[in-house]
């Protein structure tokens, strides 16, 4: 069984969806820790409710960046983490964590990357930009994390049609539902060793 760390700063709906996939035994894994920079986030509240280990760290708690990064890595190593899932984590993942967990960090993004990704494209800003552009398609991307923001290898994407009367809120609502299903699917694949790397590209094998 794989040990999973979820990094989240916000509401935590993806965390909740992953947790229910674990409870229903669809994912053969365990959320060994929730890491957050935000002590009042929905994600941390949920971790407390469900008695999941959590670790909150930010500049106020630990002003020294080197120590902050080392403390997170230490927690992950102590918990024997196999997979890190970023689920609405608004901080950059330190390079030493990326190097230590090469090809073992996933992120979910609410657009069809590389479109609407990178600096400034987070939360509702993504959906506002899609609507403003008049694009007819948006979607969900799950990708591996490397040192470039929103730029790691894409594992899986799903298209969501943009309707002519969509608002950023209505679009985000539809996309979030897909996110919950797709993230659990990707994590399940990881936990069953069904992601193979070929020439630097991650592929899903034998997946129903
Ligand atoms: C999701 O839209 C995710 O794609 C993005 O941040 C949002 C997190 O939502 N990276 P939640 O906190 O899981 O509800």
Image (cartoon, rainbow, N blue to C red):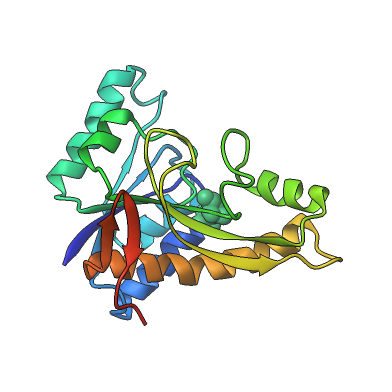
Q: Position of residue 21 (x, y in %)?
A: 36, 74
Q: Position of residue 165 (x, y in %)?
A: 86, 66
Q: Residue furthest right?
A: 165
Viewer-proximal residue, 140 or 78? 140
Instruction: Determine whether 204 is above or below 106 in the image.
Output: below
Q: Residue at x 57, y 46 (%)?
A: 114
Q: Position of residue 98 (x, y in %)?
A: 29, 37
Image quarter for residue 96? top left
Q: Residue at x 39, y 71 (%)?
A: 185
Q: Position of residue 87 (x, y in %)?
A: 45, 52
Q: Residue furthest front?
A: 199
178 to the left or right of 37: right
169 to the left or right of 52: right
Instruction: Determine whether 61 is above or below 184 in the image.
Output: above
6 to the left or right of 179: left
Viewer-proximal residue, 115 or 94? 115
Q: Residue at x 23, y 31 (%)?
A: 71
Residue 21 visible? The answer is yes
Task: Give the quadrant of the N terminus.
Answer: bottom left
Viewer-proximal residue, 61 or 36? 36
Q: Residue furthest top?
A: 64
Viewer-proximal residue, 22 or 206? 206
Q: Residue at x 49, y 42 (%)?
A: 150
Task: Give the quadrant of the C terminus.
Answer: bottom left
126 to the left or right of 182: right
Residue 11 visible? The answer is no
């Amino acid at each position: 069984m794989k040990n999973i760390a979820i990094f989240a700063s916000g509401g935590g709906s993806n965390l909740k969806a992953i947790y229910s996939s674990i409870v229903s035994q669809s994912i053969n894994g365990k959320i060994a820790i929730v890491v957050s920079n935000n002590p009042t986030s929905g994600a941390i509240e949920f971790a407390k409710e469900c008695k999941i280990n959590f670790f909150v760290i930010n500049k106020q708690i630990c002003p020294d960046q080197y120590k902050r990064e080392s403390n997170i890595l230490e927690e992950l190593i102590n918990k024997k983490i196999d997979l890190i899932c970023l689920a609405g984590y608004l901080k950059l993942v330190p390079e030493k964590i990326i190097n230590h967990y090469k090809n073992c960090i996933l992120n979910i993004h609410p657009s069809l990357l590389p479109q609407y990704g990178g600096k400034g494209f987070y939360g509702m800003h993504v959906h506002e930009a899609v609507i403003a552009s008049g694009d007819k398609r948006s979607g969900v991307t799950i990708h591996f994390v490397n040192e470039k923001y929103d730029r790691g290898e894409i594992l899986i994407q799903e298209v969501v049609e943009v309707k002519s009367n969509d608002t950023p809120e209505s679009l985000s609502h539809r996309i979030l539902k897909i996110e919950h299903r797709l993230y659990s699917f990707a994590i399940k694949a990881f936990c069953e060793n069904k992601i193979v790397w070929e020439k630097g590209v991650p592929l899903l094998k034998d997946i129903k």
